Image: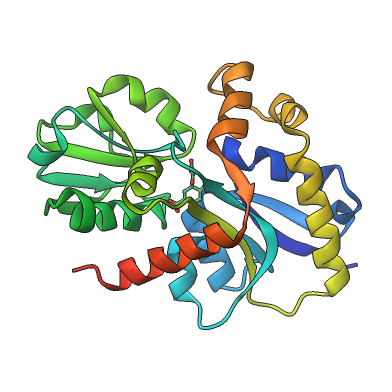
Amino acid sequence: MKKYKVSAISYLNTAPFAYGLKHSPVFNKIELLYDYPAECARKLSSNQVDLSLLPVGALSDFSSFDIVSNYCIGSIGKVRSVALMSNSNINDIKRIYLDYQSRTSVILVKILCQNVWNITPDFIPLKPSDNYKLLKEYEAIVLIGDRVFDAENHFAYVVDLSNEWFNAYGLPFVFAVWATTKRLPKELIEELNKGLKLGVNSIEKAVDEFSPLSISREAAITYLKQNISYTLDDEKFKAIKLFQTLSAKLN
Ligand SMILES: C=C(O[C@@H]1C=C(C(=O)O)C=C[C@H]1O)C(=O)O
């Protein structure tokens, strides 16, 4: 039987989903791939996979798609793992390096610069080989995922982008949704969602299976339970809409 290819995010925040899928009947029908978010988007748009945990910032790449789950990678207030880091105050930042792994947070930071902080820095893509420890004064970096757990210790200023969004708009934030460009069987989608549900209810076990874990087991559990919000509810759909409206208005 042909297996459906699924591109999931390789970070700790997706560990519960991966755990749930691996320990459910749906795992016989899928091949689970682990990619960084920008790759999840690229693989879906180039037809290399059937389903992705798709960064919301990449939704505009697709003329049509279906969101197939009421689970997502979201947050309500502080997310911890999506940060603007620098050694100078926000108002003094002249240049922001943008994580090549991200499609959503690199847009979110531009929305915040334009609408909330009122600053106009230059934006420069960060290369995989760049070393964030060499950042100059007046420069900042947006990083996402587990690398933030180490990087945040090297900077005087760490701004949580999801928290800034929450304070400005009073809404949760959605980083990625389960999306497809194909017509997938209803039964597969149902089984997928059962797997995702199992995962969201098995956070401790998901952490124990995830490696390498770059923070303590307790910190990982707290992060997944308190910072990541997995349900895609009406408020989160509102947030996606606002994000899309504001990104269309970027200079
Ligand atoms: C919460 C996070 O959100 C991530 C950020 C994304 C992006 O910026 O494109 C996409 C998916 C999420 O994994 C994180 O990476 O820590």
Where's the N terminus, which quadrant? Answer: bottom right
Q: Nearer the viewer, residue 16 or 77?
A: 77
Residue extending farthest bottom? 63
Q: In this view of the protein, can residue 10 be seen by the observer?
A: no
State how many labels appear: 0
Residue 130 percent location from the top left of the image:
28, 38
Percent of width and height locating residue 244: 40, 69
Q: Between residues 80 and 95, which one lies in front from this camera angle?
A: 80
**In the image, residue 101 above or below residue 60:** above
Q: Please report the residue visible at 63 percent of the width from the left and 25 percent of the height from the top.
A: 221
Q: Is residue 198 left or right of residue 138?
A: right
From the top left corner, tell me how far across and down residue 161 is, in percent: 35, 43
Image vertical order of residue 137 relative to residue 182, above or below? above
Q: Which residue: 36% across, 71% down?
A: 245
Judge left or right: residue 25 versus residue 106: right
Q: Left of 84 or right of it: where is 11?
A: right
Residue plotted at (67% across, 52% down): 33
Task: Depth check: give the residue in front, 82 or 244.
Answer: 244
Query: Is 122 located above or below residue 179 in the figure?
Result: above
Q: Residue at x 48, y 50 (%)?
A: 172
Query: Where residue 108 sits in the image (x, y, percent)?
Result: 34, 54
Quarter of the view holding residue 144: top left
Image quarter (top left, top right, bottom left or bottom right) of the C terminus = bottom left
Of 81 and 134, the residue lying toward us: 81
